[in-house]
Image (cartoon, grey):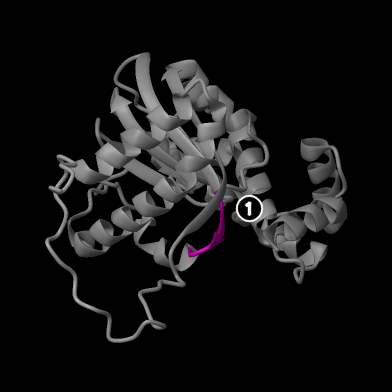
């Protein structure tokens, strides 16, 4: 009887292993869980919803399919062309500016990690430039997620693990050629000054004086370009910074308050309660518990 024609090419043969008990393993590989996919298709949803997300403590993997734009991560500005992406870590304060048009398609994958975060540092502060195999896998993940049969969705987890491995390998190989802004835009410069003002006890009027424009004009320009007020930007940054520190249960509330630019723990407590609706100790217990 002839062999069945699979119309798929396989190796003609494979040699016996040197050991039947010791195989290939990679304990440092990414192991994702709690994966969510969604698409942003207009400027308002991209810019506004990010600031409405007051508990960003997950990984965010972004791929630009249509309409270039800038992502600012903790004051670092990265320009993303179509076909490029970026990985944002938990508690990194980020938002989007300089979108070339209102109509866009930005694909988001958010997830938690059970292990393997050590292979992801190569992504920090870099634009991801996936090759065709990685883009094909990215597409397969999105198509699997979009199936009407939602029981298929868990299949995206091993595919996402593989995608992260592929991206990490390419990023390590080409890390020296990554695209960054040599000169940040004026919005990024203002954001850097805003972050500095938190720790140097400077007001928004001080920033305006340093830039040589009126405080009113500065506030107007900033809100028009970012979709958020300067005060709200600073509060969001401080909240994300506090949440990052609170994920370590060994940090005292007083120390966290000081490292976030607050003069006293009581002022910090009122801030956290206003922003989240719960006390700092309760928030810290929740965040530290999620990290375990």
**Residue placed furthest toward the front:** 1
**Would you say the magenta stretch is mainly helix, strand or loop?**
strand
Q: Could you tell whether 42 is left or right of 230 in the image?
A: left
Residue at position x 69%, y 53% in the image: 242
Q: Please check the rendered image and state whether residue 114 is part of the magenta-colored stretch, yes or no.
A: yes
Residue at position x 64%, y 56% in the image: 244
Residue 71 in percent (x, y) is at 39, 37
Query: Between residues 43 and 213, which one lies in front from this camera angle?
Result: 43
Q: Please check the rendered image and state whether residue 34 is part of the magenta-colored stretch, yes or no.
A: no
Residue 49 in percent (x, y) is at 57, 25
> Mark 1 sits on what residue?
241
Q: Which class describes the residues within 10 Å of circle 1: few (<14), some (14-19), or many (20+)?
A: many
Residue at position x 79%, y 45% in the image: 272
Query: Between residues 258 and 100, which one lies in front from this camera angle?
Result: 100
Q: Could you tell whether 126 is left or right of 284 in the image?
A: left
Give the magenta part as a residue range: 112-116
Of helix, strand and loop, which one carries label 1?
Answer: helix
Quadrant location of residue 17?
bottom left
Q: How many marks?
A: 1
Q: Is residue 177 above or below residue 228?
A: below
């Amino acid at each position: 009887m002839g062999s069945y024609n699979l119309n798929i090419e396989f190796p003609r043969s494979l040699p016996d292993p040197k050991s039947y008990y010791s195989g290939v393993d990679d304990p440092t590989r990414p192991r994702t869980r709690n994966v969510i996919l969604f698409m942003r298709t207009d400027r308002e949803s991209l810019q506004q919803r990010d600031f409405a997300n007051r508990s960003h403590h997950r990984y965010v993997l972004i791929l630009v399919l249509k309409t270039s734009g800038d992502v600012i991560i903790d004051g670092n500005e990265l320009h993303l062309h179509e076909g490029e992406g970026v990985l944002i870590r938990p508690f990194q304060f980020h938002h989007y500016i300089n979108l070339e048009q209102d109509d866009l398609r930005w694909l988001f994958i958010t997830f938690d990690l059970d292990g393997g975060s050590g292979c992801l540092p190569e992504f920090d502060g870099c634009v991801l430039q996936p090759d065709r195999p990685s883009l094909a896998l990215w597409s397969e993940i999105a198509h699997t997620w979009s199936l009407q049969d939602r029981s298929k969705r868990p299949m995206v987890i091993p595919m996402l693990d593989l995608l992260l491995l592929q991206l990490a390998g390419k990023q390590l190989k080409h890390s020296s050629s990554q695209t960054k802004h040599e000169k940040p835009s004026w919005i990024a410069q203002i954001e850097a000054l805003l972050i500095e003002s938190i720790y140097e006890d400077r007001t928004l009027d001080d920033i305006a004086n340093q830039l040589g424009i009126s405080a009113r004009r500065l506030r107007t320009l900033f809100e028009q370009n970012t979709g958020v007020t300067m005060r709200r930007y600073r509060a969001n940054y401080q909240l994300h910074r506090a949440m990052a520190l609170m994920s370590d249960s060994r940090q005292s509330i007083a120390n966290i308050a000081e490292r976030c630019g607050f003069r006293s723990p009581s002022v910090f407590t009122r801030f956290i309660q206003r922003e989240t609706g719960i006390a700092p100790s309760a928030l810290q217990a929740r965040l530290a518990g999620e990290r375990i």
